[in-house]
Structure formats: C-alpha cells, structure tokens
Image (tube, helix red, strand yellow):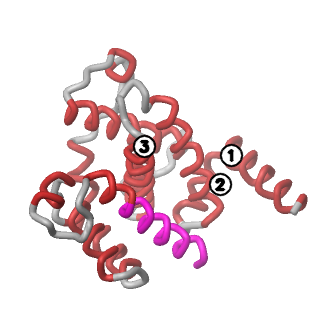
Amino acid sequence: MILTCKKSAASAYGFQNNPHVLYEKLRSLDASAISFLHQKTKKHINFKRHLAKATLEDAEELANDTILMALQKITNGTYVYQGYSPLTFTLVIADNLLRNFCRKKRIYSTDLEGIELPEMPEVEVYLTRKELEEKIEKMLDKISPIGRQVIRLKYFENLKDEEVVERKLTPYTTVDSLKTKRCAYLRILKRWVFKK
C-alpha cells in the first residue's frame, strides 16, 4: 500500500513537472495520466463550481465532459504539444464548459468571465462528435441497456434532462435521479477504461 502511494505521487510529480511526458501518456490513453488529468480537472471545477452555482453532480459531469473533450483533441491530433502543458489546455476547456453552464443558467460571473481563452469555435462542435461516438459505442456495450439509453439521450441526442423526464424516456422520474444515475453509469465506464 505504501509503495503504491509513493509510486502514484511520483508519477503525479513527473506529470506536473514534465508536460511532454503527460502529453505522450495521454496520447496513448495511459490510465495513470488520465487519472492525473481527471483529478486536477475535478479540483479546478470544484474550486469554481460555487461561482457557477453548480451542484456536485453538475461539477462531476462537467469534469467528465472536459476529460472526454481533451482526450479527443489529443488523440485525434487537433491538440499538438508545443511546449505548454496539456493540463493547461484541459483547464481552458473546463473554463469554457463552466461558462457555457453559466450561460444556460443565465448566471454571469466576473470571476469566470475574466479568464482569457484561445479561440475555439464552439469547441469545434463538441469535438467532432462522430469520432467520439464510435469509441464510446464500444464502451457502452459494457453497461446495462438503461445505462446506454441514459448516456445516449444526454450525449448523442443532446436532450435536456427536463425533457427526458417529462417525456418519460427512462425509468427515472426526477431530474436529480436521472443525473445521479448518469454519473453512476459514467463511473462504471471510467472503471472499465482504467482496467484496460
């Protein structure tokens, strides 16, 4: 147990101080690099979630979306290492998603608005959804049919949670229960990815 902690702390230190190593590990979808990126992104979003008036579930969903978008950019070659950290790039995506979250809720915060971002045309239509869908389709086979439906409705069909509940497209009767279950299914997918 102690050796594991030292090893993970050492690898995190290595990723923090060597962004090129982090980039290469993320390109090869290394579990420890993805975990490091997710941990830092989640911490970043949780720090700002109160400004955006986001719940813990919203924050977790934003962190998962951020990681998916960053990995898509890195693996398809849209983001190429040029001397700055992929962590910085990922946190910029997180800030964009937080801003979009605020716009949807019509919350305007000077703290979030004051961050300068590089040009990203609507985050390239949510990062070429089709390529991402193909990869995720394979992973979705690992969860229950209801789990697949919940994730597809949100991420592939872009339906709002309120609409899904109102139209009774899933067995979940409230928006909160739908979000909770979706986060649980995403955790299952995350565990499956890290086992590979």
Left or right side of 18 for 68: left
Earlier in the chain: of badge 1 and badge 3, it is 1
**Residue receiving disc 2:** 21
What residue is rendered at 49% in x and 64% in y? 187
Q: Amino acid at mark 1?
A: Asn
Label 1, residues with CA under 10 Å away: few <14, some 14-19, many ≥20: some
**Residue receiving disc 3:** 59
**Residue receiving disc 1:** 18
Q: Position of residue 6 (x, y in %)?
A: 85, 54
Instruction: From the viewer's side, name the closer residue of 115 and 186.
Output: 186
Secondary element type, mark 2: helix
Q: Amino acid at mark 2?
A: Val
Q: Is residue 108 visible?
A: yes
Q: CA distance from mark 1 to mark 2?
A: 6 Å
Label 2, residues with CA under 10 Å away: few <14, some 14-19, many ≥20: some
Q: Is residue 79 visible?
A: no
- Which is in the foreground here, disc 3 or disc 2? 3
Q: CA distance from mark 3 to mark 2?
A: 27 Å
Residue placed furthest toward the top: 110
Q: Amino acid at mark 3?
A: Ala
Earlier in the chain: of badge 3 and badge 2, it is 2
Above-or-below relation of 34 to 196: above
Identify the image quadrant of residue 26: bottom right
**Magenta span of residues:** 181-196
Label 3, residues with CA under 10 Å away: few <14, some 14-19, many ≥20: many
Quadrant for the C terminus in the image: bottom right
Q: Position of residue 1 (x, y in %)?
A: 87, 63
- Which is in the foreground here, disc 1 or disc 3? 3
Q: Main secondary structure of the magenta part?
A: helix
What residue is rendered at 17% in x and 53% in y? 160
- Disc 1 vs disc 2: Cβ atoms closer than 8 Å? yes
> Within the magenta stretch, is there residue 186?
yes
